[in-house]
Amino acid sequence: MTNWDNARFFLAVARTGTLRGAAARLGVDQATVGRRIAALEEALSARLFLRTPTMYVLTSAGEALIGPSEAMEQAVHQIERRIVGIDDQLCGTIRVATTDSLGQRYVVPAIAKLRAEHPGIDVVCVTSPGMANLTRREADIAIRILRPESPDLIVRRLAQLESGIYASRAYVAARGEPSEGCAFEGHDLVMYQQPVVPSMWEALCGESTHRGRVVFQTSSTMMLFEAAVAGLGVTELPCFRADHEPALVRVMPGRRDRFDVWLVAHADLYKTARIQAFIDVVAREFDPSS
């Protein structure tokens, strides 16, 4: 394999396991992917994938090609980051990754201010409970509550926010408020799915959950919020969101937790004019004194 175009088709099929998935990831049609893989196998005189009825599985030759292909991918992404990083124009696209809750309250208002100040900048905003890979340029900048440790990333703390325990007024009227020290005995809980926030299954704001009954699980903060509003049960929510919902009431007010919000950018892009412009407006959005 002598060029990146071949490598990206190969990696897309290897990562998705299907021509359809690779085509969606690359923005081309399925037939094009199939032709490119067939041509690559012919050029290398090697079968890279075993075709099964449901997916493409790497052969030994394909497995041997993963490392060199990923090295090529990393080199291409480094070139892209460095070229973008020397751009001093307040125009172009910024890819922002965040959570739906932070996005609604802070990031979207910041984007609106950015667009008002710099109409040449447009934004792609991706909301997900997972963390975008900035090194692979899945995003240019991220607003998240987990601090990454990669030396390639520049990290800045934007704020420290509070979370509390909430239930709907209707739920409290029907079931009463849980008491501190009861471990939610006799109460229903709505939770993140365990792989998303494992600590939630141990305690909410320091209150053990082991006597409560988990009746609803989700990977989305917005769905967690809506489940609480609908009266499905008790949960932990960020106060910036829950305190402004009339249908919710804070229970166990002595129980609270704090979490940091981090802005994360790749070092190669951090000094780009449009990234600095975004950082300025989002930092102001998180600053209560601004």
Image (cartoon, rainbow, N blue to C red):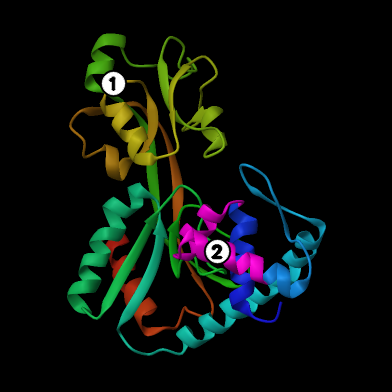
Residue under label 2, please give it: 33
Residue 88: horizontal and vertical position, in percent?
38, 90
The label shown at residue 70 is none
Element assignment for label 1: loop
Q: What amino acid type should be assigned to the residue bearing mark 1?
A: Gly
**Magenta stretch mostly in which secondary structure?**
helix
Residue under label 1, please give it: 231
Quadrant in the picture for the N terminus = bottom right
- The reply, left or right, for residue 182 in relation to residue 125 is right
Residue pictured at 35% horizontal, 61% vertical: 125
**Quarter residue 34 falls in:** bottom right
- Say whether residue 198 is magenta: no
- Say whether residue 32 is magenta: yes
Element assignment for label 2: helix
Q: Nearer the viewer, mark 2 or mark 1?
A: 2
Q: Would you place residue 34 above or below residue 277 in this image?
A: above
Q: Please rate how many residues cluster around mark 1, counting C-alpha atoms within 10 Å: few if below 14, some from 14 to 19, many from 20.
A: some
- For the record, the magenta segment spans 17-39
Quadrant in the picture for the C terminus = bottom left
Q: Please rate how many residues cluster around mark 2, counting C-alpha atoms within 10 Å: few if below 14, some from 14 to 19, many from 20.
A: many
